[in-house]
Every structure is written in C-alpha cells, then in structure tokens.
Image: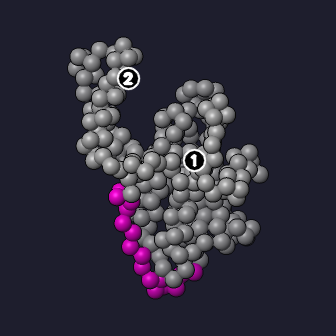
Amino acid sequence: MKPNETLLNTLLVDNNNKIRFTDEEIGDEHIMTSVDTPMRDDAFDMTDDEKMAQIEYHFKQIMETLGLDLTDDSLKGTPKRVAKMYVKEIFSGLDPKNMPSVALFENKYQYNEMLVEKNISFYSNCEHHFVPIFGKAHVAYIANGQVIGLSKLNRIVQHFAKRPQVQERLTMQIAKELQKLLGTEDVAIMIDAKHLCVASRGVKDDTSTTITSFYGGKFAEEATKAEFLKYIAV
C-alpha cells in the first residue's frame, strides 16, 4: 500500500470528522483533513456578485502589494477577471446549486457488466497553494437497475474538480456521489494527475504524476478490479 493510500484509509476509518493539523505538520505534504470540502456555515450568505466584488477588491490589494502598476492597460482589469474566474469558473463547484442535474434511466437492456468512462479530462486547484491540478479520471460502475447518461459522468467529475482540492478527496467525492446516485456500491474511480505545486515550486519535479483510486463493492474483488485496470490501460 502506498503512503498516500495509508493516510487516506486512516482518515476515513478512524475519524469521520475533520482531523486538525498545524501549518507546520502539513508543510508541503499532500494532506486532506476530511472527505467533505471544508466550508463555513455562512459560505453562501453572499450572492455571487457580492463575492466577486470582495475578491476583486482583495486581489487588487495583493497585486498592489507585489508592486504591480494597475494603471497599466494589461493589468487594470485583472482583479475583476480573477474574481469572475474564481466564482463563476474554477471554484464554481463549491456551490451546491451548480451540481449538474442527473437523470437516471431504467436499465432496459439488462446490461449487467461494468461500464467504463475513461480519460475524462479535468482541471482543479490545489487547496494548499492554489495552483492547478490537472489530469485524467477513469470512472466505472456496474448497474443496479438504473443507468446514468455518459456525459453526466464527465460533469460530475468536473463539478467536484471545480473547487480547491486534494486529489484523495476529489477521488472520494466522485465515488461517493456516484454510489448515492446509482444506488450501488459497485463503483470504481482512478485519477492520474499532475500537480503544479510539485512541478512549478518546491521540489520542482515536472515529470511525476499522482495516482489515486477507489474500489467499491464488486470492484474490491481482484478479478473485477483487474478487468477495470485492463480497460483503462488500453
């Protein structure tokens, strides 16, 4: 078992609540403190427009602190652009109202084998440094009476990616949402991603990627897991 898998299992099995770490304990490590994205109770008291106004103001302060000249034509619109990007685009998955609507269909074809949607592209952001995480997600399930539209698998992956993330949490959130929607434990997820907090800063390793996985229900059986891994390796 890999170190990140050991940590993930410890967090889930030993404590379903948030686990507290100091900044020094986290450091540059890849640590998540809960399966749920850490959110305040008042996270949605402000409207999107109010949030964008606040972010625009504060990002302007950051740019000015860095010594940038915001009267320059190239820079003067940046705080507003960043605010809109944060709220409406790259962190839009924080808001439950943006969860994609999902219609389930009766499995009339009686297809009882696994369905695999591989190479789903996603872009996310590391919650420790707010720099990009990007890669591919592979999703599989075995129907339990109902099936889901293929494009909805992509949309669910992308919804949970559009928030500050840790890759282990992203993997678990996608898996748990699909299990809930489909009414089955038989779900598998694998994510292979590059982290710019590793590639562009710190250790500056531009060649490594991180793999996380989830195997629920029948996918925990070696034969079913092997079949899934064979399909995504093609």
- In which quadrant of the rendered view does residue 102 lie? bottom left
| Residue pictured at 56% horizontal, 45% vertical | 166
Callout 1: SS: helix
| Residue pictured at 56% horizontal, 66% vertical | 140
Question: Percent x, y for residue 132?
Answer: 48, 38
Q: Nearer the viewer, residue 50 or 106?
A: 50
Mark closer to the observer (2, 1) = 2
Callout 2: SS: helix
Q: How many marks?
A: 2
Above-or-below relation of 25 to 41: above
Question: Percent x, y for residue 51?
Answer: 31, 41
Image side of residue 13 versus residue 150, left or right: right
Marks 2 and 1, how far apart at CA: 27 Å
Q: Mark 1 is on which residue type?
A: Gln
Above-or-below relation of 78 to 148: above
- In which quadrant of the rendered view does residue 76 lie? top left
Per the rendering, the mark at residue 167 is 1
Quadrant that contains the C terminus: bottom right
Tell me the residue that label 2 is attached to: 62
Q: Mark 2 is on which residue type?
A: Ile
Q: Nearer the viewer, residue 22 or 65?
A: 22
Image side of residue 108 versus residue 233, left or right: left
| Residue pictured at 46% horizontal, 48% vertical | 39
| Residue pictured at 33% horizontal, 34% vertical | 55
Magenta extent: 97-112
Is residue 10 in view from this perspective?
Answer: yes
Question: Percent x, y for residue 127?
Answer: 51, 39
Question: Percent x, y for residue 61?
Answer: 34, 22
Q: Earlier in the sequence, mark 2 or mark 1?
A: 2
Mark 2 burial class by Cα count in 10 Å: few <14, some 14-19, many 20+: few
Above-or-below relation of 125 to 142: above
Mark 1 burial class by Cα count in 10 Å: few <14, some 14-19, many 20+: many
